[in-house]
Image (spheres, rainbow, N blue to C red):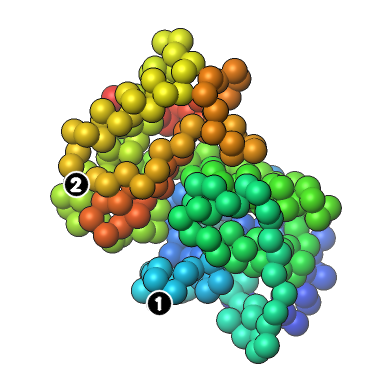
Amino acid sequence: MDIINTLEDLRAARKNMTGSVGLVPTMGFLHAGHISLVKRAVSECENVIVSVFVNPTQFSPTEDFASYPRDLERDAALVQEAGANLVWAPTDQVMYPSEYQTYVSVEEITKVLEGAMRPTHFRGVTTVVAKLFNAVRPDKAYFGQKDAQQVAVLSRMVRDLNFDLEMVICPIVREKDGLALSSRNTYLDKSERQSALVLSRSLRKARTAFLSGERETEKIRKSMEEVFAAEPAARVQYISIADPSSLKEIERIESQALVSMAVYVGKTRLIDNTILGMADPNLDGFDH
Ligand code: PAF
């Protein structure tokens, strides 16, 4: 598997590609969720580039940038096995040369939810993804629904800045017991791993309420809070029931609603979500 670090090598490789190009942007330490994106890209594009870059600008000084798990060799082996063409693993210096001062900001929808808790996060995400798009010039870019706000923000950026590419949003991949896959799950010890199931359990409760006809978001939220009350090891940071595209909180669900949450289990901050009004077989399909 070719691992390319410089822009010159990336541009040369890109020039030699004929047919469609898919990009799967990642921060590495790949798990089955990332691999599902790579496989989807491989099934839809003639060439697939997987970027691996732990992007410093999307971490605040108090977050886990230094300790974020990294293993490029393992990532490259997994990417090769999944059938992609190359790994683009730029250095910090390539992405942010000295005296770097250009950023891409999406305004309103980055101020709520994750953006309210992590004020500089999305500016880092949009900046790095815009740079990856410029470098790779993909026809399609693949992102996971797990980061629901990221999907909404990046879709808005693509639309607002006229990027000539299709955003492909892939479903959340879950463990058999419901835990959404995340690189941060490696921080959980055995008992925290068990407590972390409360996230998917509460989402399932919301789906059950919605499927049995409940449309008042306050009632759906209350039923979720009951699930959390029974799991003292989990500390809810927020539960939101919002319009999936504007991310504005709603009182009554007319068609669809994004139910999303951030929850601390021990020191680990986990996020999860589901869209009510849209099939979610991985949540509806099993019992907790
Ligand atoms: O979702 C992620 O892993 C990151 O936010 C992304 C999109 C690769 C940008 O660094």
Most foreground residue, 19 or 231: 231
Reply above or below: 240 against 54.
above
Per the rendering, the mark at residue 66 is 1
Reply above or below: 16 against 259.
below
Most foreground residue, 178 or 153: 153
Residue 247, position as x, y percentages in the image = 59, 39
Residue 271, position as x, y percentages in the image = 41, 47
How far apart, in angstroms, are the residues tagged by discs 2 and 1? 26 Å
Identify the residue at image location x=48%, y=68%: 59
Dot 2 and dot 1 residues touching (CB under 8 Å):
no
Residue 138, position as x, y percentages in the image = 75, 58
Q: Amino acid at mark 1?
A: Ala
Q: Residues within 10 Å of mark 1 (few under 14, many from 20)?
A: few
Q: Amino acid at mark 2?
A: Ala
**Where is the N terminus found, in terms of image quarters?**
bottom right
284 to the left or right of 14: left
Badge 2 is on which residue? 233
Task: Give the foreground label among 2 and 1.
Answer: 2
**Residue 89: quadrant of the picture:** bottom right
Residue 215, position as x, y percentages in the image = 49, 16
Pointer 2 or 1: first along the chain: 1
Reply above or below: 241 against 123.
above
Q: Residues within 10 Å of mark 2 (few under 14, many from 20)?
A: some
Residue 76 visible, this orientation: no
As helix, strand or loop, the secondary structure at mark 1 comes to: loop
Asked whether mark 2 and ligand 1 are closer than 8 Å, the reply comes as no
